[in-house]
Each structure stands twice: as structure tokens, then as C-alpha cells.
Amino acid sequence: MTDATLYLTSLAQALAKMSLYAEGHPSRARAADASFARLRTLQQVDATPTFSFLGREVIYYERTLRDLADWDWAQRFSSAGVQRIEFEAAVDRESYHAFLEELLTRVALAQGMRDKPLAIAASPRATPIRFGAVGVRGDAESDDEAIDAELEESERLDLSEEADVVTWMHDEVLVAHQLPLAEAEAVVHSLAHAMQGSSRALIPLLTLKEFDQYTTTHALNVSVLAMGLAERLGLSAREVKGYGVAGLLHDIGKVKIPPEVLNKPGVLTPEEFDLMRSHTVEGARLILEADRHLDLSAVVAFEHHIMIDGGGYPTRCTRRDCHHASRLVHVCDVFDALRTHRPYRVAWDTASILAYIEKRIGSEFDPVIADAFLSMIRGSEMRLAHARSIDEDVLVGAL
């Protein structure tokens, strides 16, 4: 095991032991000290370790800890609103003990009060350990909302955690000039798991309407649509995940576009339109700077506005064969964009969007991909309508 894995294991062991004894019992202090010693060992090789938790995934900087795959405590931390833990170099024993006590309280509340409002305020004092929602670097005020959303009905598909992570990723690009790819992959893994675990999760677009930020919502929607379509077309599990990451990052370049241009209610000026079109090039650059091995996502970011007849941008040309992933993400992108209300136009209904896609097969959209997409959406709409009719029948029967 790595030092990081050994430390997290000791953290879980300490919390488990502390939960068995009353406050002030010497066994609590011994358990905390054992974990603190592991932290100091880790800090000999990494002075400021940082961990992120998404579902049962554990991310240590830019990589997933394989030794802790499907780790139960990651789910507990995440459910308690603790999606990230950051340590400074100067962590003292007193601060660490206080951190464990508050972390244990959060986990206990999350497990024991799922049907009650849970409000946990961030500690006002300066501390060498920062933890909370993914936005811990700059803002802890979203903790309550993240926790409340996480503790809502367990049966309803809840993507609030993934939305928080994507929003934080966009902030990281703007503030820290870094693209957290490990978190992006963890989000896609979580989305794929949700799609498999819920009969209503193929198109979680209705649930996602509750989020205000279009860029975040759109990224998640396109990722889910891309994975669903890739799977329908018979791609391998590895390819499906790759297409999901590409869908999640396809518009990452838009974080560089000023909000007043991105959300302008009127017609864009030629200068503003050129700026808007630059998000494809900017997105590809951001992805390649973060990881040159993530070339598929970079290609999709660059090509996803190019039509199969050569139209679109960033370049207009004669008929061009874009990557299969780019053509697939393009139809998903168009569908979700048109169905979403924007400052400059109202949302389209599903039937109108499908008619638009069908009309432009062969010019804008790849015929095989578009046909599969139309079939997927229509099938999903039928299943959703059937589920609603069953719910209504049950409700009527109960009256």
C-alpha cells in the first residue's frame, strides 16, 4: 500500500474506534494519535496532501487510488458533504484531533438524520486542515446545500454532487489555471453507475433542470447522452467511458468566455461571435495542457461544432471526416442545447428537436449516429411516459 492509502485506512480506523467510546475516553485519543502518526509519515513525502471523494471513488491529486476502489468510507464522507480534504504542512496534534471530532460528527449526522434538515456551519477559526464540499478552496457556503441535496430521497436520481464537482472544475480552470482530470473521470464513473442503477437515469435531464448554471448542467447532460448513445452503438466499455469524458469536457473552453457574451440575450456582434467560437480551440488547448494523453477529449472539444458537410466552426472547409466521437457528441450537444431555455431563445420541445435532427441527417449529422440517437430518445420518452402512467394509476388507486 502507498503512504496515502495507509493514511486513509488509519483515518477510517480512527473514526470507527472513536465512535465506540464516549468523549474524553482515552481510547479516543489513542485512536486519533495513531492516525495522526500516519499523517505525519505521509507528510514526509507529501507535505500538503489533498484528497477528493466522489461516491466510492478516492482521488489523490490527479489519480484514483486503486487500493481503495469502492471504499465505503468515501461514500460516507461524500454523503456527509465532505468531498475534499486538504492538509497544510503545519498540522498539529490539537488541530488534527479537532478535525477528527468534527468529521465524525458530520458522518454520524448524515447516517442518523437522513430524514431531517442537516445544517453544519464551517469552523470560523483558521485551521491547517480544510474540508467540506468540493469548492473548499474558495467557498464553504455551499456545504449546507450540498448536504441537504445529498440527504434527500434516496430513490430519486440525485446528481447534485456531480454538478458541484463540475462547477468546481470550471472554477479551477479560471482561478488555478488547472483542469482536474481525475475528478472529471470520477464524475463520468459516477454518471455511468447512476445510469446502470436507475431505470429513469438514461436521460436525467429533468432532474438537472433544477441547477442554474447552464454550462455545468449541459456538460453533465451531454456526458450522459454520449455514454448512452455510445453504448447503444455497441462500443466497448472503455470507449463508452472515453466518450463520456469527452462529452463532459467538450465545452470546457467556455469558461474563458465572459459571462456577458455567453449569456447575452440579443444577437452577438461579429467580434463577440468570434470570441464565442474560440471556445473550441481554447478547450482543446486546456485539455492538452492538462494531459497530452487525453487526445480524444481534445479532438472532440475542437471538432464538436463541425458538421459532416464541412460547415460549422472553428474551420469551414470541404467535406471533412471528423472523429466518430466528435460526430456523436455533436448530436448530443445540439439536442441538449435546444431543449434548454437560454437568454436569447426559449427551449424547444422534444418533438421539434427530433424533427430538426431528422431533417439535417446527412448534412449536419452523421446518418448512423443520428438514427441511433433518435431511436434512443424516442425509446426513453416512451419509457418515461409509461412510468408516469403507472405512477398516476397508483395514485388514483390510493385515493
Image (cartoon, grey):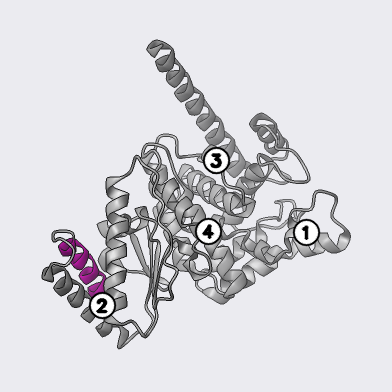
* Type of amino acid under label 2: Thr
Q: Where is residue 45 in the image (x, y as percent from the top left)?
A: 32, 87
Q: Which residue is drawn at 50% across and 69% down?
A: 180
Q: What stretch is highlighted in magenta?
A: 5-18
Circle 3 — which element? helix
Q: Are marks 2 and 4 in contact (CB under 8 Å)?
A: no
Q: Is residue 245 visible in this depiction of the protein? A: no
> Residue 241 in magenta?
no
- The residue at the point 24 percent across, 69 percent down is 11
Instruction: Tell me if mark 2 has few (under 14), some (14-19) or many (20+) residues whose alpha carbon lies within 10 angstroms of its own.
Output: few
Disc 2: which residue = 2
State which mark lies toward you, 1 or 2.
1
- The residue type indicated by label 1 comes to Val
Three-letter amino acid code at disc 4? Answer: Val
Mark with earlier residue (1, 3):
3
Q: Are marks 1 and 3 in contact (CB under 8 Å)?
A: no
Q: Position of residue 225 (x, y in %)?
A: 53, 45
